[in-house]
Image: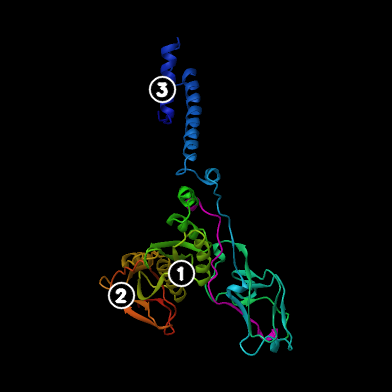
Amino acid sequence: MPIFAEKESKIFGDILYDVVTDTNISRTSPGSKTRAIAQAISKKLGRMWAQFDTNIVLSFLDGAEGRYLDYLGAMMGISRLGEVRATTTSQQRVVKFYVNVGTFGDINNGSSILLPSGTILSTGPNGSGINYRLPYSTVLPASASETYVAVQAVRAGVTFNLGAGQLRYHNFTGYTNQLNDSLKVTNEAEITSGREIENDTNYRFRISNQVVASESANLTAIRLAALVTPGVADVVLIPFNRGIGTIDIIVQATLPRTSDTLLAAVAEAVFKETAQGVVPNVMAPIDIGMSMRGTLTLREKISNNEQNDLIRTVVSNISDYINNLEIGEEFIVNEAIERVMSTSDMIKNVGSATKPFDRVYIHRPTLLEDNKVRETLLGDFDPENDEKLIVEDRYAGANPISFTVAT
């Protein structure tokens, strides 16, 4: 029979009833010793029932959290994924040292440059921002003008994942022309392999699908193999998209864009789970760029510095909304308006009732490299199942998302 926890008030009533019925004690009015003893016992039993109820919940997958979820995972032979440092190898050709003119020898009296292990690369000057380091010593040949290196984040977690072109500084000064800052560094692609300790929701999902996934060569096994790859936010599986025996795997990264290195890592993971005769195709979603112009009406006049801070926050909120849309998820104008209006109580309105944003464009890729078709968006936008909206790159020398304050 099912077990239900009893409330403290019911326990208290049952105790008084049994005392009066089964003993010669009849005084149970407020202030009596009998009532005080019954109250103390019922409080203790009520807490015990509550603890028992909690323990029951923690013993099932839907209610288990923390270490109790770990216990259930251990029973299924599946462990919680630990945190991972973002890394990239020299073979992946992501991070490189280079010179703008000439060779490494030209900036070091004709000699090669030895970068010691532990050299710090960062997104800001003097080690500010996000820091990476060289895991081992690397030689920059005197005759070369660029060399790719392996790097590792100084700490684990997704906060150390980077977009392309963000690593621009280093602390190495051991070359002749260092006063002119001739030795440059950059990351040509995203680095997205950093990962936090797996949260309860994801771990619970993997546990619940472990039995099916253990059979391998099925959609669940392929999906889980892709999802546990560091840097993956979600995947969309399209079986038979290219005919019988094919499956397309569209990868959404934790960053707005899905890098080639992440696709390669996912491909390596899912190939181990596919059956003979099945041809998987790991691909990035089709990025549909979006740009926007808007005008804010404020409730009262504020200083220029306050206006600039407010506009930066609005731009950040709109950018986050667009970049965090899932693959195939619709852009909704009213949601964008809500993101703007919720930024500050100082904002009275955005645009007008019939035209909340001055201009909204979507930028579709074409078969020509570095060429896109710009279309004016008049309402909501519903992308295809393999498309993902992102904030468009800078174009025509302007920021893709910009707002002004009405005078």
Q: Do the residues labelled 3 and 2 touch (CB within 8 Å)?
A: no
Residue 161 placed where, x, y %?
Answer: 55, 67
Main secondary structure type of the part rendered in magenta: loop
Q: Residue at x 53, y 72 (%)?
A: 190
Estimate the x, y position of residue 209 in percent, counting from the top left. Answer: 46, 50
Q: What element carries label 3?
A: helix
Q: Eyeballing the image, is 197 above or below 176?
A: above
Residue 127 percent coordinates (x, y):
64, 72
Residue depth check, mark 1 versus mark 2: number of the one nearer the observer: 1
Work out whether residue 27 can be spotted. Answer: no
> In the rendered structure, does residue 108 fall within the stretch colored magenta?
no
Viewer-nearest of labels 3 and 2?
2
Segment colored magenta: 177-202
Residue at 72% x, 78% y: name it. Answer: 114
Q: Kindly identify which residue carries mark 2.
A: 377
Closest to the observer, 165 or 10: 165
Residue 254 appears anywhere in the view? yes
Left or right of 152, for residue 298: left
- For mark 1, give the secondary structure: loop
Is 201 located above or below residue 187 in the figure? above
Going from N to C along the chain, the mark reached first, 1 or 3, is 3
The residue carrying mark 3 is 13
